[in-house]
Image (cartoon, rainbow, N blue to C red):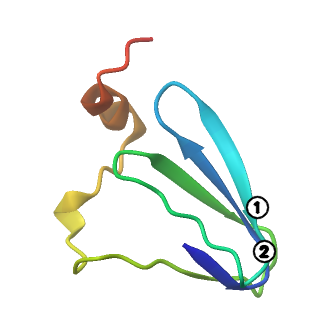
């Protein structure tokens, strides 16, 4: 993930811990491994984020419900 313009915060969550990263320079990138919940917060109206992937987009590959994500991770509360 690269923010080519503006600034964003990317919150990552593995089901047990959370960490937030600021992407505010176009020479920095963030690699997010599989099964990490991420939330992008746009800090500037003109922000542009590019997401690079090694395969074509397939909507069914994505978990869009946080409780389902937690269930799939096998995390107990």
Q: Residue furthest front?
A: 27
- Label ID, residue 65: none
Which quadrant is home to the C terminus? top left
In this rendering, position of residue 28 left or right of residue 44: left
Residue at the image point whose x is 31% and y is 30% from the top: 73
In this rendering, position of residue 1 left or right of residue 72: right
In this rendering, position of residue 18 left or right of residue 56: right
Residue named by callout 2: 7
Looking at the image, residue 15 lies above or below residue 8? above
Helix, strand or loop at label 1? It is: strand
Q: Quadrant of residue 59?
A: bottom left
Distance of label 1 from label 2 (alpha carbons): 7 Å
Residue at the image point whose x is 47% and y is 36% from the top: 14
Where residue 70 sits in the image (x, y, percent)? Answer: 36, 29
Mark 1 vs mark 2: in front: 1
Residue named by callout 1: 22
Helix, strand or loop at label 2? It is: loop
């Amino acid at each position: 993930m690269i923010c080519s313009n503006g600034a964003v915060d990317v919150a990552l969550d593995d089901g047990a811990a959370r960490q937030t990263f600021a992407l505010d320079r176009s020479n920095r990138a963030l690699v997010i491994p599989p099964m990490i919940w991420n939330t992008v917060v746009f800090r500037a109206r003109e922000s542009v984020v590019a997401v690079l992937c090694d395969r074509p987009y397939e909507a069914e590959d994505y978990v869009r419900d946080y409780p389902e994500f937690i269930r799939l991770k096998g995390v107990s509360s």
